[in-house]
Image: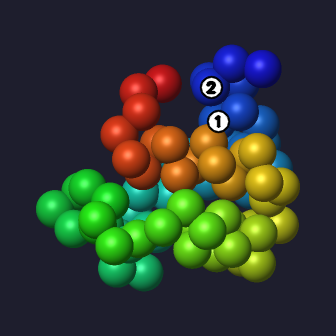
Amino acid sequence: MSFQAYLDNIQKKTGKSPDDFKKLASQKKFLENGKLKADVKAGQIVQWLKDDFELGHGHAMAIYALLKGKEK
């Protein structure tokens, strides 16, 4: 599955776009100046997304990659 396919499936499941997840991550203080803080670990992001959005590990890791700066 391509990175874009992961993002598309996440949006279908949650109703949230990649930009929405960036905004939410910023509100949760995972981002600083639009970039993932150095002390934020993948496990923190994955747990947040599993708890709040019921995403699986692979989909949560796609959002983590997005937050780290991976392009679509």
Residue shown at 66%/65% (left/top)? Answer: 46
Quadrant housing the N terminus: top right
* Residue 21 point in image, percent of width and height: 50, 58
The tag on residue 41 is none
> Considering only vertical position in the picture, is 62 above or below 47?
above
Quadrant in the picture for residue 32? bottom left
* Residue 6 point in image, percent of width and height: 71, 33
* Residue 22 point in image, percent of width and height: 41, 57
Pointer 1 local density, CA inside 10 Å: few below 14, some 14–19, many at least 20: many
Three-letter code for the amino acid on which mark 1 is drawn: Leu
Q: Which residue is the site of mark 2?
A: 3
Quadrant in the picture for residue 36? bottom left
Q: Which residue is the site of mark 1?
A: 7
In this rendering, does residue 19 appear at all?
no
Q: Residue furthest left?
A: 33
Give left or right: position of 26 versus 49.
Answer: left
> Looking at the image, is mark 1 or mark 2 nearer the viewer?
2
Three-letter code for the amino acid on which mark 2 is drawn: Phe
Q: Element at badge 2? A: helix
Query: Do the CB atoms of the residues marked 1 and 2 lie less than 8 Å apart?
Result: yes
Q: Element at badge 1? A: helix
